C-alpha cells in the first residue's frame, strides 16, 4: 500500500484509509490512535485525559470522534486516563477480565465495558481486532492487530520475548508498532538497581533493540510500509541506537522507519 504521508485533520473521514498515530510511548504514558475514517479508537490511555486530548488536537485529531478504548494491560502507564476519557466521551472500554480485575479501582466506574479474550477476534465498529497473548509481567497482557479498509496494523509493545504467537499474528502487517526498549549494554551500565535490570531483561520484561531487530527481520514482506519503534527507555536507549540497529535489520528494504517518543509520539501515518 502506498504511503499518503503525514496527514492532519483530513486523516479522519476521508475515503478508504487507515490512519495511525502514537500519541505517547514510554514508561510515563502510552496511547495510540487508529481510525479507518468510520471508527476511531485508542489503544491504551496512559496519560491524563486532558493531555491525551491536547496531543490529539495538536495532531489534528478530534477527541469527539473517538468510539472506544482498547486496553492492553493494567500497568498505570497504559490505563491512567482510561476511566476519565471513557466517562467524558461515553466511550466503550474493551478489556479482558484479568486486566480489569488487576486494575482494581484505577479505572473507576466505566459507562460500558466489553470483555475480550486473547486469541478470539472481535469487531469495534468497522475495525477488526485480533488480540494475542504476550509475555509481560501483567495479569493477562495483550498485543493487537487492527484491520480496516484492507490494511493491517500490528501493535506489540511491553513484551519480554517475541514468541511464536506474536510472530504469527504480526505477519502481513502494513504498519508495525514494535517495542525497542533498551540497548543491552546501556542497561547493564546504567543506574537502575540490579533486580530492575533483571526484570527488564527477562522473559516478561521488555524487548531490547537487538531482539526487536530479529523480530522485524522475520516479519518483513513487500507490503510493509512503516515501522514505528515504541517504548524506548529514556535512560537505557537512544533513538539513534534503536534506529541504527533496525536499519541494519531492514537491509535496504523500502520501509519507512519512525521513532515514537514519550514527549511527542509519532506523526499521523495514513495508508490508502
Image (tube, rainbow, N blue to C red):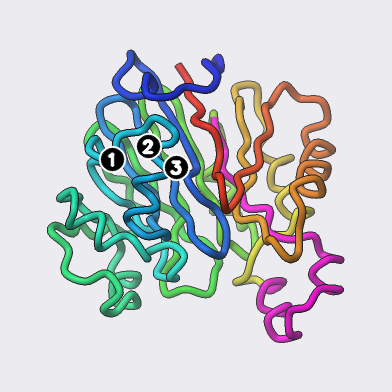
Disc 1 crowd, CA 10 A, few/some/many (<14, 14-19, 20+): some
Q: CB atoms at circles 1 and 2 under 8 Å apart?
A: yes
In-image side of 219 versus 94 (left or right): right
Q: Which residues are magenta?
A: 175-202
User: Against 80, is 223 above or below?
Assistant: above
The residue that label 1 is drawn on is 63
For marks 1 and 2 on the same chain, the one whose residue lies earlier in the sequence: 2
User: Residue at horizontal 78%, vertical 78%?
Assistant: 191
User: Against 28, is 193 above or below?
Assistant: below
The residue that label 3 is drawn on is 145
Please tell me whether residue 217 belongs to the stretch shown in magenta: no
Camera-side residue of 211 and 246: 246
Residue 196, image x and y in percent? 68, 81
User: Residue at horizontal 84%, vertical 38%?
Assistant: 248
Residue 18, image x and y in percent? 41, 26
Residue 134, image x and y in percent? 52, 61
User: Residue at horizontal 44%, vertical 54%?
Assistant: 132
The residue that label 2 is drawn on is 57
Please tell me whether residue 184 belongs to the stretch shown in magenta: yes
Disc 3 crowd, CA 10 A, few/some/many (<14, 14-19, 20+): many
For marks 2 and 3 on the same chain, the one whose residue lies earlier in the sequence: 2
Amino acid at each position: 500500500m502506498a504511503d499518503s504521508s503525514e496527514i492532519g485533520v483530513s486523516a479522519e473521514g476521508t475515503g478508504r484509509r487507515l490512519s495511525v498515530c502514537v500519541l505517547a510511548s514510554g514508561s510515563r504514558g502510552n496511547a495510540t490512535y487508529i481510525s479507518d475514517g468510520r471508527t476511531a479508537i485508542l489503544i491504551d490511555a496512559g496519560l491524563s485525559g486532558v493531555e491525551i486530548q491536547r496531543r490529539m488536537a495538536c495532531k489534528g485529531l478530534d477527541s469527539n470522534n473517538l468510539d472506544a478504548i482498547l486496553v492492553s494491560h493494567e500497568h498505570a502507564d497504559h490505563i491512567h486516563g482510561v476511566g476519565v476519557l471513557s466517562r467524558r466521551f461515553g466511550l466503550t472500554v474493551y478489556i479482558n477480565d484479568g486486566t480489569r480485575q488487576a486494575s482494581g479501582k484505577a479505572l473507576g466506574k466505566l459507562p460500558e465495558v466489553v470483555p475480550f479474550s486473547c486469541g478470539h477476534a472481535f469487531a469495534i465498529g468497522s475495525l477488526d481486532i485480533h488480540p494475542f497473548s504476550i509475555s509481560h509481567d501483567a495479569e493477562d497482557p495483550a498485543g493487537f492487530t487492527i484491520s480496516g479498509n484492507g490494511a493491517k496494523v500490528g501493535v506489540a509493545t511491553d513484551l519480554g520475548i517475541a514468541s511464536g504467537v506474536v510472530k504469527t499474528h504480526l505477519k502481513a502487517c502494513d504498519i508495525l508498532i514494535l517495542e525497542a526498549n533498551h540497548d543491552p549494554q546501556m542497561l547493564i551500565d546504567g543506574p537502575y538497581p540490579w533486580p530492575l535490570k533483571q526484570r527488564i531483561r527477562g522473559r516478561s520484561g521488555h524487548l531490547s533493540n537487538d531482539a526487536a531487530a530479529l523480530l522485524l527481520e522475520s516479519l518483513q514482506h513487500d507490503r510493509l510500509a512503516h515501522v514505528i519503534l515504541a517504548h524506548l527507555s529514556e535512560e537505557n536507549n537512544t533513538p539513534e541506537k534503536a534506529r541504527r540497529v533496525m536499519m541494519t535489520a531492514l537491509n535496504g528494504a523500502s520501509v519507512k522507519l519512525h521513532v515514537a517518543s514519550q514527549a511527542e509520539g509519532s506523526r499521523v501515518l495514513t495508508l490508502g
